[in-house]
Structure formats: C-alpha cells, structure tokens
Amino acid sequence: MRLLARINIAASLATVVLTAACSDSSGPSAADQATAIAARFDSIYVDATAQSNGGANAYVSRAGIASLLEVPPAFGAIPSTITVTTASGSESWKGFEFVDLTPSGTDSNFVLLAYREEAAHTVLAVIFDSTGAPYLAGLITGDTLSASPDSGSAATTLVSVGAACRTPPSSLTNPEFDTPFASSCSLATFRTSLTLQFPSSPGIEAALASLTFAPTAVNGIRVVDPLTGRRVNSLLHALRSAKRL
C-alpha cells in the first residue's frame, strides 16, 4: 500500500442512514446537530485562515483540514463515534467519510477524516482509491504538527446510499460553499478499518505512535462532482510526497 510521507493540507451513519427528519423533544434534530457541527468547523476554518498569515505558515494545513471536516455536516451528515486503540489505550474519536466520484462516475476516491477532539486539534486523514485501498494517510496534531505513518494497513467500502443531502446552511462563511459543490449528493454509510504506526517525533504525543480501529460504520456522503471540476480533489491537492510501502 501507499501512505503519505508528509502531509500538508492547504486548502471524512452508524448502522442507519441519518436524515434531516425532526427529532422528539428529548434533543435537537439531526439537521440541527449537523448545522451546529458544520458551524463549529466553519469557525475553526475562519480562525485558522486568519492565523495562517496568508498561507505562509502551518495554520494553512489546519484551515484545509477544517474545510474538509466541514463538508459532510454542511450537507447533513452526523459524525460517527470511532473507538480508536492508541499506543496508550482506547479512546473515543469522531469521524466522517465521503466518496467523491467524477461526473461520469468512472473514477472515485474515498476520504476518511477522524478527529480526536471537538476542536479537531488532532485529525487523521486517509485517502483510498476506488477499490477501497489506501494510498495517502497522515496525521495533524497540535493544530500544526504533522506525522506520517511508516507502516500500516486500511480498508473501506461503501455500504449504503440514503437520502439526498440538504443544501448547506447560508450561515456558513467558508467560500467552498459559494458555488455548487456537487452535481448530486446523498447521505451514505461506509465500513472502514485501519492500523497505522507512526515514528516518534518531537512534540507529538507518544499515544499517537499507534492508531487502530476495527471495522466500523462511518457516516458520510456520496458526492458526484460538478461538470466544472473535481471540488473534493481541489481540497486535497496539498497532500504531497506520497510514498509506496
């Protein structure tokens, strides 16, 4: 498999497909939850962009990660809980996944995004090819520190496609939503697993040296690109220097 040698992103439905149906009085609706989550990542994007000094420092990676994390909830997906076994024990992370298809439907990429905290200070990104085999992966932690796996394996598959995505809320300020993001979009369910090993690196927690989770249902979206270009790919262009393992 191939894994990312260095990650610098400038600018991923439990067992049931969630829709924007209203919930009962015991809590917010799925639509309200998705809106709140999208708004949080929108705010992180704005803050990181302001700190990036026009793209001159590592906060540009945090801005890109925030943009990617903002996409699924903006279209109505709710994050899944992912039980991650780290080098120090079990932790509960959150995650999204999406599959991005060309307008003709002849090519696709899967993108998994798993984040450790609500503020997404630590985010794992894995990109898979159309067969569900991984070819890029990387970790950003402490907002701006990056780490690259030196070994590991992963797999993903699209399990089901559900209701059409909603229109992103007009309150979002990220310019990614100023123009059509997809020619079609549906809520979806994925099944994903991985084991990644990271070398020790200054400033990065020892717990993050190993990240593993068993096959897990992950909420997300299925996106068909607009005829004007591959929007998801444009958010991933700064994933550079992939190596084959």
Image: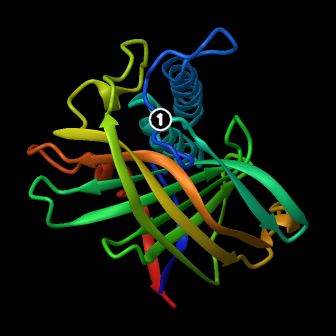
Residue closer to the observer: 131 or 47: 131
Q: Is residue 53 above or below residue 212?
A: above
Q: Is residue 130 above or below residue 186?
A: below
Residue positioned 48% across, 20% down in the render: 31
Q: Is residue 11 visible?
A: no
Left or right of residue 195: residue 29: left
Residue positioned 72% across, 76% down in the render: 198
Q: Which SS class for mark 1?
A: loop
Give the image location of residue 173, x and y in percent. Answer: 42, 19
* Colouring chosen for the image of the structure: rainbow
Total label count?
A: 1
Residue positioned 54% across, 52% down in the render: 218
Q: Residue furthest right?
A: 88
Three-letter code, disc 1: Leu
Residue positioned 46% across, 75% down in the render: 134
Rendered image quadrant of residue 167 = top left
Q: Which residue is mark 1?
A: 18
